[in-house]
Image: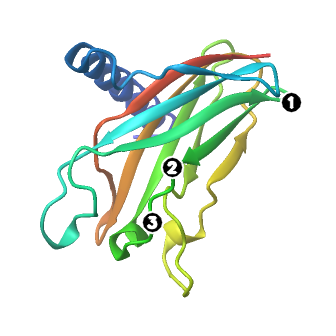
Amino acid sequence: MSTSTGTLSFAAVALGGAILASSLTDGVASAAPEANQAAGQLTFAIPAIGGVEIGPGGVPGGSFQQTRVTARPQGEASVVFVATGLAPWFYQYAYRYVSVAWHNLSTGATGTVALRHWRRPSFPVTGYPATLPTVATARTGAGLVVAAVTVVREQYKGSSPSSIIPGLNALIVP
């Protein structure tokens, strides 16, 4: 499967999950706009609902936690994605991050942004998630942009989604 086909498949699965989540949770998984007074624009919060957290591989807070990313248009046909409500350090977070897959429906452009959704500890931590930022800008181009957020967990054979309900939203990028 090519990367673009994989991204489109991921976006289709994310869209289906978000629609199902909206119908099952009365909109809990759908993003609600918050007014951004300073910029005069809308900021969208895109929660992803995590999976079951048990045993030695679980994280504090239990199962079905919300991991939130905000998205807002900025500057030259770009979107800023920000991981908010960063979780306090726990050793299992060194294997987790969020993936934001976006698709500009007006131009067909697609991309993925990876973000760390936890605070770094005061000591060195290794691994890919520890190198990630909590804020990233994607040059999406102008138009209608759909973004899906998934919590990802690294495992010995690669990475896999650990969200049961991906977050999803759409915004217009000037």
Using the image, determine if residue 125 lies above or below residue 129: below
Residue drawn at (31%, 16%) of the image:
19
Cβ–Cβ under 8 Å for marks 1 and 2: no
Which residue reaches farthest bottom?
Answer: 123
Using the image, determine if residue 89 lies above or below residue 61: below
Residue drawn at (52%, 35%) of the image:
4
Q: Residues within 10 Å of mark 2 (few under 14, many from 20)?
A: few
Looking at the rendered structure, the secondary structure element under dot 2 is loop
Q: Give the Cα distance between marks 1 and 2.
A: 25 Å
Residue 136, position as x, y percentages in the image: 68, 48
Three-letter amino acid code at the position of disc 2: Gly
Pointer 3: what residue?
Answer: 88
Looking at the rendered structure, the secondary structure element under dot 1 is loop
Of residues 31 and 102, the one nearer the viewer is 31
First reached walking from the N terminus: tag 1 or tag 2:
1
Cβ–Cβ under 8 Å for marks 3 and 1: no
- Label at residue 94: none
Pointer 2: what residue?
Answer: 85
Residue 10, position as x, y percentages in the image: 39, 33
Residue 79, position as x, y percentages in the image: 71, 32
Pointer 1: what residue?
Answer: 75
Looking at the rendered structure, the secondary structure element under dot 3 is loop
Q: Which of the 4 quarters of the picture holds residue 170? A: top right
